[in-house]
Image: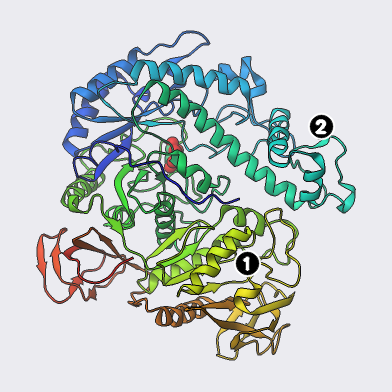
Amino acid sequence: MSTPLTLRAEQPLVPGWAAGTITLGCDYNPEQWDESVWVDDIRLMRELGVDLVAINIFGWAQLQPQPGPFDFSRLDRIMAMLHEAGIRVNLGTGTSSPPPWMARIHPETLPRFADGTLAWPGGRQAWCPSSPIFRQKALELVTAMAERYGDHPALALWHVSNELGCHNALCYCDVSAAAFRTWLRQRYGTLDALNAAWGTAFWSQRYGTWDDVLPPRATRSAGNPAHLLDFKRFSSDALLEHYRAEESVLRSRSSVPVTTNLMVTAHIQTQDYWSWAPHLDLIANDHYLDHRLGDPLAELAFSADLTRGLAAGRPWMLMETSTSAVSWQPVNHAKREGELVRTALGHVARGADSICFFQWRASRSGAEKFHSALLPHSGTAGAGWASSLELSALLDRLSPVVGTRVEARAALVFSWQSWWAAEGDAQPSRLLQYLPEAHRYHRALRSLGVTVDIVAPGTDLAGYDLVVVPTLYTLTDDDARAIADAAASGATVLITPFSGIVDENDAIRPGGYPGAFRELIGTVVDEFRPLAAEATVLLDSGRRARIWSEQVRVLSAEVRDTFVDGPAAASPALTRRAVGAGSAWYTATVLDDEGVLALLRELCAEAGVPALEVGPDVDIVNRVSATERFTFIINHRTEAITVPVAGHDLVSDERIEGSAVVPAGAVRVIASGRSDRGH
Ligand code: GLA
């Protein structure tokens, strides 16, 4: 199921990294502009210090306006101009959105929704990930691109497609149905094995022939959860296969590193990036503040920590973010004074060595014309351009952090597959949601000033002092063993409810919940007793909890808290079992935010992880090399904070003695010698 990360050997990364500076980059869409504007663009890019531009992301229709030969003349010219200006290129293969003729001539390449409705062209990404015709046409373009530009002196990085799966991840058409069956045959071998894995004895779902197996199209009742889970796995693999097909064409003709921009974010869940990461030379993420969430800055930190997990701790690239507002949320909030710097540094603090923006010049037309850009509609006269210049200058001053690693003594185990499966249609409560729970535990640790590595199930956790396992609903026996081993070798491990419930086929692990962790936590859950939407329950400690309670039987653990009222009154709500040199804690409920904070404070104390109590609107993260430590302090608050740290502040170029006063909205990056232990 989950693939522990084995990254490629160290690869040459994009220039800029090699030169030891933080790369400043952007998407650039020259096809939207007359060539006379390009001259101005390049002059201003140089003025701003842009190192890397992503071009040809949506270039297909310009390169091939009709089926037939490609016209590379404009792309040749802009490549040459960028090269002459010393700006490196992150070259899109251009396959993310086909030209309009594709749907006319090959309508079978269009994707379908679960109810069978066709997704028409007119937006972007109107293609079925499993379509052989689309794949063939895309690879013709990629081949021509690789042959033409594979050793172009401006080329620094290949950018396959764009945000694979942003709009077309789940396709339910007949072509996808056939590809799904092929994928299932590879996974199960026989129909009997599939029937057993999916539990098709239930509701007369047994398959007698492969041809009857379909994607989980819209039904009148709840579908089969194992079928739904496998379709998500298949869909993630189908897009990865597309990536790999383009990647292989590029690698056979060019030695330049290859990547694609991932979407590690709260509103996209369709790709299991743990299985993608080993195929990328450089982990690149797109992140935008999501103002639909309760705490967008906490989600930024979560995304950045998870992206670093995908990079197995190595530096990574923020391939896209916005200078200010986006154009795709219900209300598109502009960034406040200083927020561009604070958010960009939020990513650098958590391991990004490249900060790139969507996009260079704000568009005049199209669905993103109100999206912010490095060069806004107001040109160079307004505050937008001034903020871009300010950020560029600051990134230059942070060159010493390039290549350093983030220091973390806590880990959080994250699983896309548990996200998919835990939130199925027929669970004990729809109120228990996977991602918000993972976010809450991460957010609490961030507000204690504790940096967290977000890791895949199955990761070797040796060396972490604290391990948090939120709602890890589906996992393999090996994944469970890695968590038990962490406790045995000295870590404090916390497991939260609805973890370890099913195997990788979404079948209950028998013998009492949570089957995968029963022995580790020394307790057994006899029954889930979820709560109504507004209900709260009181615990013995005075803490309050919501959403979930359980009837728990203790086998060999200490009871640390008990339900006072509610449907599980008198049952244990929090248990701790000493395990080897460490411990395994289990919470049988959804503690409110204060309860989570109090519990994590206790766990940090037990684990010996220092808690700085910085509160929710401050980031404190250390990046370290063998000899140096860089303490990032990002103060999102409206009042100054004081942090006990001494050294040289790279931001203000001042010496800090004893403690750093960080004014409201300000950032500090304090370089000091490395003396104490790190992870
Ligand atoms: C994504 C896409 C870009 C653009 C931005 C807008 O990241 O990759 O093409 O649409 O969103 O925020």
Amino acid type for the residue under numbered disc 2: Asp
The answer, for residue 489, to whether it is visible in the render is: yes
Amino acid type for the residue under numbered disc 1: Ser
Near mark 1 (Cα within 10 A), the count class, few <14, some 14-19 or many ≥20, is many
The quarter in which the C terminus is drawn is bottom left
Which disc, if any, is residue 171? none
Dot 1 corresponds to which residue?
499
Q: Residue drawn 25% across and 68% down?
A: 664
In percent of width and height, residue 90 lies at 33, 31
Query: On the image, which quarter does residue 52 sit in?
Result: top left
Query: On the image, which quarter does residue 210 sit in?
Result: top right
* Vertical position of residue 238 compared to residue 4: above or below: above
Q: Residue drawn 21% across and 38% down?
A: 380
* Vertical position of residue 599 compared to residue 126: above or below: below
Most distant residue in the right direction: 204
* Vertical position of residue 67 compared to residue 302: above or below: above
Q: Residue drawn 59% across and 59% down?
A: 478
Q: How is the image coloured?
A: rainbow
* Vertical position of residue 113 compared to residue 528: above or below: above
